[in-house]
Image: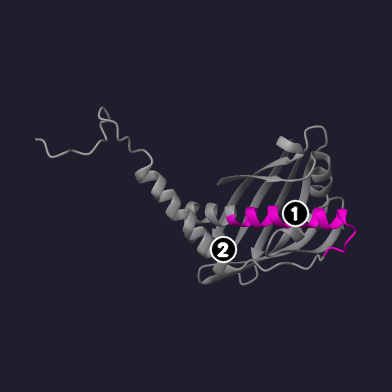
Amino acid sequence: MLVSNEFEVAQPLEKVWGFVQDVPNVAACLPGAELTDDLGDDDYAGRVNLRMGPVKLEFAGKAHVVERDHAGHRIAIDASGSDRKGRGNVEMTVTARLTAGAGGNTKVAVDQDIQIAGAAAQYGRGMITDVTAVLMKQFATNMQQRIEAAERGESVDLKPQEASGLAIGVRAAQLALLRVFRRFFLPYDPSPTSSRAPSRGGA
């Protein structure tokens, strides 16, 4: 399952590129993620805690940087993990591509090729896509704050942040409703020639 998201960071391209190459910093920006060990050679051990509805998932696994394209500002990471209670596993490849945006900002496009088995798979593509969108929004905000803090010479708290099940669930539900709204209402064309225009009472 391929899930794609985009966001913008109000920082220059090269500064954001330097930040995303620091895997511990990147992991600290993602709610629920925590690196537990630097294994060397771009290999890392870590865990991810995430609540989706009534299910709290606690994955432990490894990540490996498989590509660093400095010229193209592209980085790819393979990650895999298993739920600590044996309820499933996840494998994914995360690819981030950075490009210069307007006003000196940086656009970040993230593709996640995800394979999920077990408890999380029951939610289906729609829910997983919506939850991922919420996490990416939080990730972008955290990245912005950390880069700004580093510019000011302030210490950065690298403690893992909880991925709040309630907040994520509420926002994901809002995105699902918006998707339904777009599907059923936006295609409607009120023009007289439209075949979708409602009848005005004629036979």
State the image coordinates of residue 154 (x, y, percent, origin top left). Answer: 88, 62
Q: Is the magenta stretch mostly helix, strand or loop?
A: helix
Name the foreground residue: 125 vs 136: 136
Closer to the chain start, of discs 2 and 1, is: 1
Name the residue that disc number 2 marks. 168
55 up-or-down from 29: above or below: below
- For the residue carrying disc 2, how many other residues have a C-alpha within 10 Å: few (<14), some (14-19), or many (20+)? many
98 up-or-down from 130: above or below: above
Q: Which color scheme does this rendered protein use?
A: one colour
State the image coordinates of residue 142 (x, y, percent, origin top left). Answer: 72, 57
Total residue callouts = 2
Residue type, numbered disc 2: Ile
Name the residue that disc number 1 marks. 143
Magenta part of the protein: which range?
A: 134-156
Quarter placement of the C terminus = top left
Q: What element carries label 1?
A: helix
- For the residue carrying disc 1, how many other residues have a C-alpha within 10 Å: few (<14), some (14-19), or many (20+)? many
Q: In which quarter of the image is residue 30?
A: bottom right
State the image coordinates of residue 184 (x, y, percent, origin top left). Answer: 35, 45
Name the foreground residue: 160 vs 140: 140
Residue 38, numbered circle: none
